Image (spheres, rainbow, N blue to C red):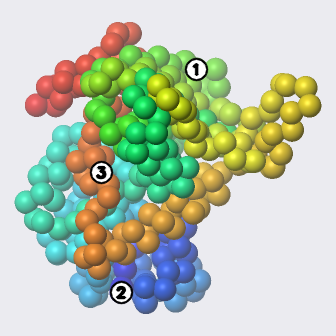
């Protein structure tokens, strides 16, 4: 099949390499506002360069991967749907939930498959945790913990347009806990602080945050995030039930030192970058998208799924601003 890629920044270039390595992908058609980025992909992977997204859509592609800037996501998703082309888009669907709702309605009405990039759904440990929940081997759940600790903050220019740590970073945690538990969040209480890069505070954001989630069955979710984890890139998930507990991310490259005498775990070099930590998950995610394109399966992470994670992020953002618990039906109501 022929796959288009719109946007060849850091993650777009990474996805180009992953897609080029899949046997089912015969040709990549790429486009980026920076000609040098598109030329680099053409040189590395034998991709065909198109001078605009419109040219990519008109090139006979079977599916398209959107890794452009966030502001461009809604328009490109809608253009793909209008062209009748299955689409994969990195999160978020849009910068605001209002735009996301517009995209949701258009995708539903079109019948075209759209997959949103929440890669933790394809991480082997998270998949095993979900299977343990579904099998009932953990018993009734009481607590789920998800952690995303970045080794260093993104640049100031990125932070200024990111929408904040809950919309940009914790949204991955919000999605994975919802997916693994199979339950919906009904209330959020969140807090945050600043002890690092001053430009994060100046942007009206926090660099360290926690959110306490209440699910519709009474399960408690605990989310932890920071932009400053000097030891490395720490992403973990714990699921605790009445019969057993399970964790994802406890590998030998876990960026955490044990203080217990004689304990050598973890013994490997710490994870330092999300692309290294999740390389197998990204490959599984894009392999799944080729199956969506082929029509052998439906999207495993829909626009509606992405919107649910966004509602949680909106509630957490409001909770920090107003120092109070926020119910999800409240933020849904605010969006009309």
Q: Could you tell which of marks 1 and 2 lies nearer the N-terminus?
A: 2
Residue visible at 57% across and 63% down in the picture: 280
Along the viewing direction, whichever of 127 and 117 lies nearer the viewer: 127
Please state, as top left, top right, bottom left or bottom right, where the C terminus lies in the image. Answer: top left
Q: Position of residue 93 (x, y in %)?
A: 30, 51
Q: Could you tell which of marks 3 and 2 lies nearer the N-terminus?
A: 2
Callout 3 crowding tier (Cα within 10 Å): few <14, some 14–19, many ≥20: many
104 left or right of 315 in image = left
Please state, as top left, top right, bottom left or bottom right, where the N terminus lies in the image. Answer: bottom left
Along the viewing direction, whichever of 52 and 190 lies nearer the viewer: 190
- In terms of secondary structure, where does tag 3 sit? loop
Q: Position of residue 139 (x, y in %)?
A: 43, 32
Disc number lying in front (3 or 2): 2
Quarter of the image holding residue 115? bottom left
Q: Could you tell which of marks 3 and 1 lies nearer the N-terminus?
A: 3
Quarter of the image holding residue 183? top left
122 left or right of 83 in image = right
On screen, residue 84 above or below 78: below
Residue visible at 25% across and 52% down in the picture: 303
Question: Badge 1 is on which residue?
Answer: 194
Callout 2 crowding tier (Cα within 10 Å): few <14, some 14–19, many ≥20: some
Quarter of the image holding residue 168? top left
Along the viewing direction, whichever of 156 and 133 lies nearer the viewer: 133
- In terms of secondary structure, where does tag 1 sit? loop
For marks 1 and 2, give the CA distance: 47 Å
Question: Badge 2 is on which residue?
Answer: 1
- In terms of secondary structure, where does tag 2 sit? loop
Q: Which mark is residue 93?
A: 3
């Amino acid at each position: 099949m022929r796959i288009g890629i719109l946007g060849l920044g850091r993650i777009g270039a990474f996805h180009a390499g992953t897609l080029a390595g899949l046997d089912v992908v015969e040709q990549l058609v790429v486009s980026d506002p920076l000609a040098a980025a598109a030329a680099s992909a053409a040189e590395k992977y034998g991709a065909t360069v198109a001078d605009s997204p419109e040219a990519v859509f008109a090139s006979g592609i079977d599916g398209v991967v959107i890794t452009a800037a966030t502001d461009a996501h809604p328009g490109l998703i809608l253009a793909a749907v209008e062209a009748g082309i299955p689409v994969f888009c990195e999160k978020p669907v849009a910068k605001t939930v209002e735009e996301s709702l517009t995209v949701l309605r258009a995708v539903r009405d079109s019948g075209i498959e759209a997959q949103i990039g929440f890669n933790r759904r394809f991480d082997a440990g998270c998949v095993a945790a979900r299977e343990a929940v579904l099998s009932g081997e953990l018993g009734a759940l009481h607590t789920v913990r998800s952690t995303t600790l970045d080794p260093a903050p993104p640049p100031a220019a990125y932070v200024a347009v990111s929408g904040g740590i809950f919309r940009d970073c914790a949204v991955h945690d919000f999605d994975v806990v919802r997916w693994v538990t199979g339950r919906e969040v009904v209330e959020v209480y969140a807090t945050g602080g600043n002890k690092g890069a001053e430009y994060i505070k100046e942007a009206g954001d926090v660099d360290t945050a926690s959110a306490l989630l209440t699910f519709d069955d009474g399960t408690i979710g605990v989310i932890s995030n920071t932009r400053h984890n000097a030891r490395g890139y720490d992403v973990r998930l714990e699921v605790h039930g009445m019969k057993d507990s399970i964790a994802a991310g406890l590998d030998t490259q876990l960026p955490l030192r044990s203080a217990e005498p004689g304990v050598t775990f973890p013994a490997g070099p710490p994870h330092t970058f999300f692309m290294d930590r999740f390389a197998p998950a990204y490959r599984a995610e894009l392999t799944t998208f080729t199956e969506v394109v082929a029509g052998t399966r439906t999207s495993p992470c829909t626009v509606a799924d992405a919107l649910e994670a966004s509602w949680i992020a909106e509630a957490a953002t409001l909770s920090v601003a107003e120092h109070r618990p926020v119910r999800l039906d409240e933020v849904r109501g605010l969006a009309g």
